[in-house]
Amino acid sequence: MGGLEVLLDGATDFGGRQVAWRSLRKVGNAWLGTLPVPALRGVYPIVLRVDDHAPAFRSERWLLRVFAPGTGSRPSFGDPADAARWWVRTVSRGTLVTLRAWPRPGFDRRDLRLHRLFVVAYSPPGQPGVDERLGMFVTAVRDGYGGRWRFLEATVVP
């Protein structure tokens, strides 16, 4: 094998463009290289190819996890919406008013089997009035295909 290249499937740069293939170099019995930093947190399938004319190969177990510290220690759920409910109840300490699945924005190319986006409306603690409600976009992530869901992040924009 002459060379090896790696791609993080669905990883984009801060302009929303798919990150490029990266060349790896063989050192002894190992392949070494520097992976790009994706613009968005999440789970990215790793794809390999021998050269740009060869077919790519992958495994559902080859994943790069880009998480904030503590993500893996959060509770997990069978339903991704439960991760959003957990965030409202536990992190914001609010009362959930409504929760809806939200389509991912055009710049987000992450695998939908591993990431889900929701919009939530909630009342902050002690502020039940309609005019006091807040909204947030909450992303749930799976730690692998078929895995359970965890809260990944909450943002004011999708």
Image: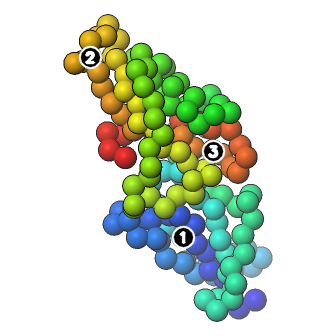
> Nearer the N terminus, badge 3 or badge 2?
2
Q: Report the front residue among 133 and 47.
A: 133
Q: Which residue is mark 3?
A: 142
Residue hosting label 1? 34
- Quarter residue 150 falls in: top right
The amino acid beneath tag 1 is Thr
In the image, 128 versus 31, the foreground residue is 128
User: Callout 3: 10 Å neighbours few (<14), some, many (20+)?
Assistant: many
Q: Residue at x 62, y 38 (%)?
A: 149
Percent from the top left, x then y, of residue 67? 53, 46
Q: Give the mark nearest the N terminus, 1 or 3.
A: 1
Distance of label 2 from label 1 (alpha carbons): 49 Å
Q: CA distance from mark 3 to mark 2?
A: 33 Å
Q: Is residue 126 visible?
A: yes
Q: Nearer the viewer, mark 3 or mark 2?
A: 2
Q: Residue shown at 58%/81% (left/top)?
A: 23
Q: Which residue is mark 2?
A: 130
Residue at 41% across / 31% down in the picture? 120
* Labels 2, 1: front one: 2
- Residue type at mark 3 is Arg
Q: Amino acid at mark 2?
A: Val
Residue 49 image point, x, y percent: 67, 81
The N terminus - image quarter: bottom right
Q: Residue at x 42, y 25 (%)?
A: 98
